[in-house]
């Protein structure tokens, strides 16, 4: 492992683990850190991952992010138009990672609106878009750059944009077994929904983070195992791959102040 790494780089490596055992599925990272995480997974331990150029081609190697020189040649492999994307979505052969504004205890997320009423919210955001159908059709993970009780809220999301482990909101004919939320990676820890009755469970604490910090900044109870490991530090090989994938260091701007990854 390397002793010099940033929090963004730690989160990229922790997020990449969400894709480790996926095999040949379409990996979609929405945002800089999720995209780098999926790319890192493809470049290291899961070469079977599928990834597009965000237009219409599937790649055999992920494109670096940011401006690229005129001599750059993408590793295009085959056509991956919209219809083929939907084939992957509906068949469950896709894993998306994105950053919702709110997440509740059931794993329902909000990417749409905050406060007010449905017809007149206080704040409008991106919108639910395709997330309702995506969330019931394939696996999803979340990246949250600022772990707080404003994100992990006490009650239900102001606007439910995606399905979670809430039996009251399951679509007709669906069961909780159809919901597949893999990991939640934040600036403090890694969590999943592996607790009793799909309760949020703590999987690891980032170096230098105390359990109390996570509990105080989460608006609902989480399951804490008897022994909580520390999130693994990036290896030198992983850091080299990340640097090549992000030559303009856009990762440094994704987490406030981007401190050292080990905050002991």
Image (cartoon, grey):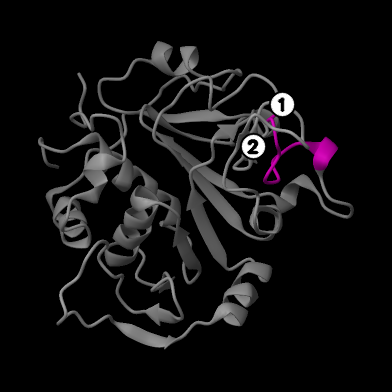
* 213 displayed left or right of 180: left
Q: Residue at 68% x, 69% y: name it.
A: 90
- Residue nearest the observer in this picture, 34 or 54: 54
Q: Residue at 31%, 35% (x, y): give it.
A: 255
Give how far across and how far down residue 204 sits, in percent: 39, 30
Regarding residue 173, the answer to whether it shows in the image is: yes
Q: Residue at x 25, y 61 (%)?
A: 66
Q: Position of residue 175 (x, y in %)?
A: 80, 49
Task: Name the secondary structure under disc 2.
Answer: strand
Spatial CA span between label 2 and label 1: 9 Å
Residue 186 versus residue 158: which sits nearer the camera?
Answer: 158
Give x and y (percent) for residue 91.
66, 71
Up-down: is 149 above or below 252? above
What residue would you read off at disc 2? Answer: 113
* Nearer the observer, 224 or 249: 249
* Left or right: 191, with 87 as reference point: left
**Among all residues in the image, which is located at the extreme right?**
172
Name the chief secondary structure element in magenta: loop
Which of the pair 128/22 is nearer the observer? 128
Residue identifier under label 1:
116
Look at the image and say whether residue 137 sits in the magenta stretch. no
**Mark 2 in CB contact with mark 1 (< 8 angstroms):** yes
* 158 in the magenta segment: yes
- Image position of 214 (left or right of 157): left
Q: Is residue 113 above or below residue 220?
A: below
Q: Quadrant of the C terminus?
A: top left
Residue 107 visible from this viewpoint: no
Q: Quadrant of residue 131?
A: bottom right
- Helix, strand or loop for disc 1: loop
Q: In the rendered image, which quarter is residue 9 located in?
A: top left
Q: For the magenta stretch, what is the residue range?
A: 156-169
């Amino acid at each position: 492992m390397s002793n010099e790494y940033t929090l963004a780089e730690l989160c990229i490596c922790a997020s990449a683990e969400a894709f480790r055992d996926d095999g040949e599925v379409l990996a979609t990272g929405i945002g800089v850190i999720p995209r780098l995480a999926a790319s890192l997974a493809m470049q290291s331990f899961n070469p079977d991952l599928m990834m597009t150029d965000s237009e219409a081609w599937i790649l055999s190697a992920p494109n670096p992010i940011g401006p690229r020189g005129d001599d750059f040649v993408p590793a295009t492999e085959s056509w991956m138009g919209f219809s083929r994307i939907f084939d992957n979505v509906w068949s469950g052969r896709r894993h998306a990672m994105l950053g919702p504004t709110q997440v509740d205890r059931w794993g329902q997320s909000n990417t749409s609106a905050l406060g007010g009423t449905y017809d007149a919210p206080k704040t409008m955001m991106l919108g639910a878009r395709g997330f309702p159908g995506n969330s019931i059709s394939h696996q999803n993970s979340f990246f949250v750059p600022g772990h707080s009780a404003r994100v992990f809220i006490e009650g239900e999301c102001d606007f439910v944009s995606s399905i979670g482990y809430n039996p009251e909101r399951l679509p007709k004919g669906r069961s909780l077994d159809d919901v597949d939320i893999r990991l939640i990676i934040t600036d403090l820890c890694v969590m999943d929904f592996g607790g009793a009755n799909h309760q949020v469970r703590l999987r690891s604490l980032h170096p230098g983070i105390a359990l109390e910090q996570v509990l105080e900044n989460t608006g609902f109870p989480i399951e804490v195992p008897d022994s909580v490991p520390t999130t693994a530090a990036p290896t030198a090989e992983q850091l080299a791959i990340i640097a090549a994938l992000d030559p303009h260091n856009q990762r440094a701007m994704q987490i406030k102040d981007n401190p050292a990854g080990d905050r002991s």
